[in-house]
Image (cartoon, rainbow, N blue to C red):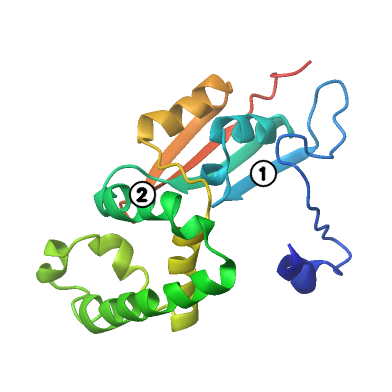
Amino acid sequence: METAFRNIGRLPNAHVIQADILAPPFARAAGKGAFDFIYSIGVLHHLPDPEAGFRSLVRCLRPGGTFFGWVYGYENNALVHRVIDPVRRRVTSRLPPPLLRTIAYPMAVVMHALVKGVYRPLQGRAALQRLPAHAYLSSLTDFNFRQNYNIVFDHLVAPTAFYLKREEFEGWFQRAGLEAVELSWRNQNSWRGRGRLPAAAVR
């Protein structure tokens, strides 16, 4: 939030607000939300109840408004489920941030070397398809070290993280009554979803 405020907080057409996602401080007249478009990237899967956060945001839409969200996917994330997630839950999320930053550094060095030295040279070649998590790790090849370090740190620091199957994520949109729902598999390890609140949803 501090970074967002430094970047855009003083613009005349931007407001940076820190609040509880389950009780957002936005006026709702006669049950109608105020927003034409809401997006959530990298947030919902870190909530104790991700779908409750989703429903809270959808209630802030105007009739006819659109919601877009991105969440961690369950599919094609075996390494995360079997190794990274258990370590994060039991160990790294409980460490003091300075210590965790130190631990994340050598891990980031290894990952950065891997994506730059192996995945990047193989882009566009058939051999790349045989490497694990090739779609995701290939997407990191143009990132600098700081960006890849932040990805490693982010996976280790969160006290809560859910990895959602497609049918779970799609069910959120259906139960919220959104229409024109579109889901896509990003980098074969996460889900993007978009849906529109019916214009006649609230009279």
Residue at mark 2: 86
Q: Residue at x 50, y 69 (%)?
A: 100
Residue 85 image position (x, y, % from top left) = 37, 50
Q: Quadrant of residue 15?
A: bottom right
- Residue that mark 1 sits on: 38
Q: Give the x, y percent position of residue 98.
A: 57, 74
Judge left or right: residue 22 versus residue 126.
Answer: right
**Residue displayed at 40% across by 42% down:** 163
Q: Residues within 10 Å of mark 2 (few under 14, many from 20)?
A: few
Judge left or right: residue 74 versus residue 199: left
Q: Is residue 172 above or below residue 80?
A: above
10 Å crowding of disc 1: few (<14), some (14-19), many (20+): some
User: Residue 153's x, y, as percent?
Assistant: 48, 67
> Under tag 2, what secondary structure?
helix
Mark sitting earlier along the chain (2/1): 1
Q: Is residue 110 visible?
A: yes
- Closer-to-camera residue (196/15): 15
* Residue type, label 1: Ile
Residue lying at the far top in this picture: please name it: 203
Of tags 2 and 1, the one toward the viewer is: 2
Where disc 1 sits, the SS reads strand
